[in-house]
Amino acid sequence: GAGVSQTPSNKVTEKGKYVELRCDPISGHTALYWYRQSLGQGPEFLIYFQGTGAADDSGLPNDRFFAVRPEGSVSTLKIQRTERGDSAVYLCASSFRLGGVETEAFFGQGTRLTVV
Amino acid sequence: AQRVTQPEKLLSVFKGAPVELKCNYSYSGSPELFWYVQYSRQRLQLLLRHISRESIKGFTADLNKGETSFHLKKPFAQEEDSAMYYCALSGGGYQKVTFGTGTKLQVIP
């Protein structure tokens, strides 16, 4: 597909379990972003990748959250020992960014995570 | 710290009436300002950014540095404008964007 794809679209997990959320960016996009959107709030920045490296991970709330992008394309957001407060929609976006050139960032449809 | 404030959770207007969605920001430096829109059951998408100075779907927004505001305006609301609107800022480009809490615009036929 031409857009940013996130899987699964919905995930229900028990408190304390480990989850992985996947993001397939638009082909050729060098930058990838993860956001978290809690109910009634705007998206909140988590982490930004440029290529394979995390250029800014200052938004990750604690060490239970980790993200990788090993080949500079697909990214996985990993959450250990999930808590009920982790319940939210997790959004991924991608853009082409190289030197001073940057295109618009396009968002995926999100993964709705519910921790019970 | 950077912050975006959207004071209205819900704004209801009649079709054909003018629309103004308010946005104020706090940022030490020169921010880049955006408006994003999310239509029902669709993805979040960029509506406009202040540096492009474009009018998209009849919407405009002017950055007022003195009042630290970036209000979104449209002279005549249409039913298809009903959506959730988010004001956002960054230090430049799309990295580490800070979003407001959003305003739901409801256009009454």
Image (tube, grey):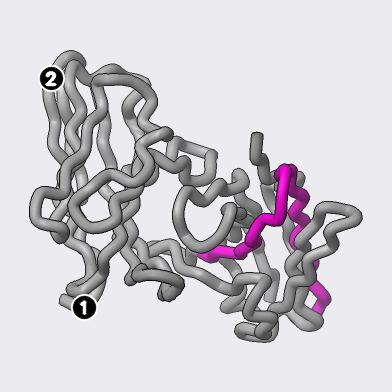
- With respect to residue A65, does A39 lie above or below? below
Which residue in the protein does label 1 denote?
A2
Tell me the subunit letter for badge 1.
A
Badge 2 density bin: few <14, some 14–19, many ≥20, Cα 10 Å:
few
Q: Quadrant of residue A54?
A: top left
Q: Residue at x 34, y 20 (%)?
A: A62
The amino acid marked with disc number 1 is Ala
Provide residue A104's location: percent of width, then percent of height: 43, 72
Q: Residue at x 61, y 50 (%)?
A: B102
**In the image, is residue B107 part of the stretch drawn in magenta?**
no
Which residue in the protein does label 2 denote?
A17
Mark nearer the N terminus (2 vs 1):
1
Q: Which mark is residue A15?
A: none
Quadrant where the C terminus of chain B sits is bottom right
Lateral position of residue B107 relative to residue B18, left or right: left
Q: Are marks 2 and 1 on the same chain?
A: yes
Observer-nearest residue: A54 or A114? A54
- With respect to residue A15, does B79 lie above or below? below
Tell me the subunit letter for badge 2.
A
Q: Residue at x 17, y 22 (%)?
A: A80
Q: Give the magenta-colored segment's residue range.
A: B15-37
